[in-house]
Image (cartoon, rainbow, N blue to C red):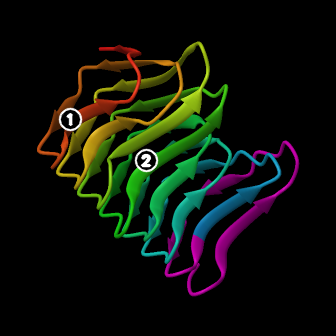
Amino acid sequence: IQNGEVGILCNGVNTAPTIKKCVIINNKDGIRCNNGSYPDISYSQILNNTQYGINAGGGSLENCRISGNSKANIYNREGIIKNCVISNCLNGTGLIFDGFNAYTAISNCTIIGNYGHGISYNINTGKICLEIKNCIISLNMQYGIYHKYGNQSIISNYNNIWGNVLGSFKTDYNSWAL
């Protein structure tokens, strides 16, 4: 799916479309999900889109390659992300999570070579809402993980976080549980 305004548009209240074994390349947005659509994306490549690779409220992402997108490879509120390579975002962050009262789990992923942060997490809640396990987060041009605001806890276990230009972690709040 290539050269369009949006490669795949999911637009339905509380829907969970399945997107599997797709190559989505050279669109404005690779996958855009509106109105509470939470896609299940697997075994796909989302590459070289001029804005976002994936712009959604949440959902799951497994065994995918998301690379070379301009604003962010993934812009989400919450989700489950497993066994993915998220790399080379041209002008922004690898993964951006933004919103409130959301939970995100990232495991067995490689997040590498993004122009901004590897992960930027801006969720405001009082519960544990970000778990990062068994990931490589390296060679990003800003921080590996940046916790911008909120009062949440962050759990990070068994990761290899190194070589990020500004450092491995930055938090504006004292809420890390490493």
> Where residue 63 is drawn, which disc sits there?
2
Amino acid residing under circle 1: Ser
Query: Does the magenta segment cover residue 56?
Result: no
Question: What kind of element bears circle 2?
Answer: loop
Residue at position x 65%, y 42% from top? 58
- Disc 1 from disc 2: Cα separation: 25 Å
Closer to us: mark 1 or mark 2?
1
Using the image, determine if residue 111 lies above or below residue 167: below
Magenta residues (range): 1-29
Residue 78 vs residue 36: left or right? left
Residue at position x 59%, y 26% from top? 103
Instruction: Identify residue for label 1.
Output: 168
Residue found farthest to the left: 163
Q: Earlier in the sequence, mark 1 or mark 2?
A: 2
Amino acid residing under circle 2: Asn
Count every numbered label the image shows and give the total: 2
- The answer to which of 124 and 14 lies nearer the viewer is 124
